[in-house]
Image (cartoon, rainbow, N blue to C red):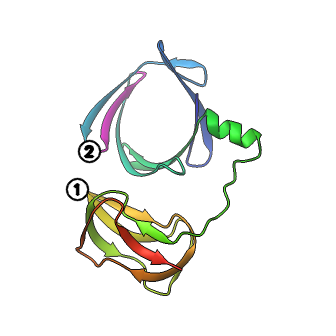
C-alpha cells in the first residue's frame, strides 16, 4: 500500500494487487502508455490525462508532475515509512555533506552557487542536462561551498564530484 499526497493536501491510499489497483478502497480501471521520456498518457475511469514527470527526488519520495499542463507536487509514503513514523523515527536529522556528486552522466548547463556560499538542504546547486532533460541538482545537506569542481558546459560522469563543501 502507498499513501500519496498531492499538493500537500489531498491524500489517497493506493493498493496494488493481482486484481488491479484500488484507490481509497475503490477499484480503478486504468491504462498507461509511455509517449516519451518521462511522458505518459493515462486513461483512468474513462478520463484521459497527459502526464509528464518534471522532477523526482527518490530520497524524499517526492515528485513534480504536470497533468494536462498543470503542475502538481506528489509525495509518496510506503509501508516502511509508516512503520518508521509509528516508531518515531520518521524525522531524519539535517546532515552535513562533504561533496555533491553527479547522480547521472550529463552536461553542466548552469551553476547556481558560488564558492564560500552557505547552502542548505534542498538548495539548487546546478542544472545538469541528461537524456535531453534538464535536471536541477539540489544540495542533499547543509554546508559551505569550498570548491566548485566543474564549470558550465563541462561533461560529467555519474558519481563525479561536482562541488566540495566544508
Q: Secondary structure at mark 2?
A: loop
Counting from the top left corner in percent of width and height, residue 66 is at 39, 47
Q: Residue at x 27, y 71 (%)?
A: 109
| Residue that carries the numbered disc 1 in the rendered image | 132
Counting from the top left corner in percent of width and height, residue 131 is at 23, 53
Split into 4 quadrants, where in the image is the C terminus?
Answer: bottom right
Is 114 left or right of 35, judged from the image as shown?
A: right
Counting from the top left corner in percent of width and height, residue 115 is at 44, 86
| Residue that carries the numbered disc 2 in the rendered image | 37
Q: Secondary structure at mark 1?
A: loop
Q: Residue at x 70, y 41 (%)?
A: 84
Q: Residues within 10 Å of mark 2 (few under 14, many from 20)?
A: few
Residue 126 quadrant: bottom left
Magenta stretch prevailing secondary structure:
strand
Residue 67 quadrant: top left
Q: Are marks 2 and 1 in contact (CB under 8 Å)?
A: yes
Q: Between marks 2 and 1, how big is the CA–CA gap?
A: 9 Å
Looking at the rendering, the stretch of residues picked out in magenta corresponds to: 37-45
Counting from the top left corner in percent of width and height, residue 29 is at 43, 18
Q: Residues within 10 Å of mark 1 (few under 14, many from 20)?
A: few
Query: 34 and 107: which one is in front?
Result: 107
Split into 4 quadrants, where in the image is the N terminus?
Answer: top right
Q: Which of the two discs, 2 and 1, labels the residue nearer the N terminus?
A: 2
Residue 96 quadrant: bottom right
Is 165 left or right of 93, judged from the image as shown?
A: left
Q: Is residue 113 magenta?
A: no
Residue 119 showing in the rendered view: no
Above or below, 65 against 12 in this view is: below
Q: Residue at x 59, y 35 (%)?
A: 78
Amino acid at each position: 500500500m502507498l499513501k500519496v499526497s498531492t499538493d500537500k493536501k489531498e491524500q489517497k491510499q493506493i493498493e496494488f494487487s493481482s486484481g488491479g489497483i484500488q484507490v481509497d478502497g475503490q477499484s480503478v480501471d486504468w491504462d498507461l502508455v509511455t509517449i516519451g521520456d518521462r511522458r505518459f498518457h493515462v486513461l483512468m475511469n474513462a478520463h484521459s490525462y497527459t502526464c509528464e514527470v518534471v522532477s523526482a527526488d527518490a530520497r524524499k519520495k517526492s515528485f513534480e508532475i504536470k497533468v494536462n499542463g498543470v503542475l502538481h507536487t506528489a509525495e509518496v509514503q510506503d509501508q516502511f515509512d509508516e512503520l518508521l513514523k509509528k516508531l518515531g523515527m520518521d524525522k531524519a536529522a539535517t546532515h552535513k555533506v562533504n561533496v555533491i556528486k553527479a547522480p547521472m552522466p550529463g552536461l553542466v548547463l548552469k551553476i547556481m552557487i558560488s564558492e564560500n556560499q552557505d547552502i542548505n538542504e534542498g538548495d539548487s546547486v546546478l542544472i545538469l542536462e541528461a537524456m535531453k532533460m534538464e535536471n536541477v541538482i539540489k544540495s542533499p545537506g547543509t554546508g559551505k561551498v569550498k570548491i566548485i569542481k566543474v564549470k558550465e558546459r563541462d561533461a560529467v560522469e555519474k558519481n563525479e564530484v561536482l562541488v566540495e563543501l566544508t
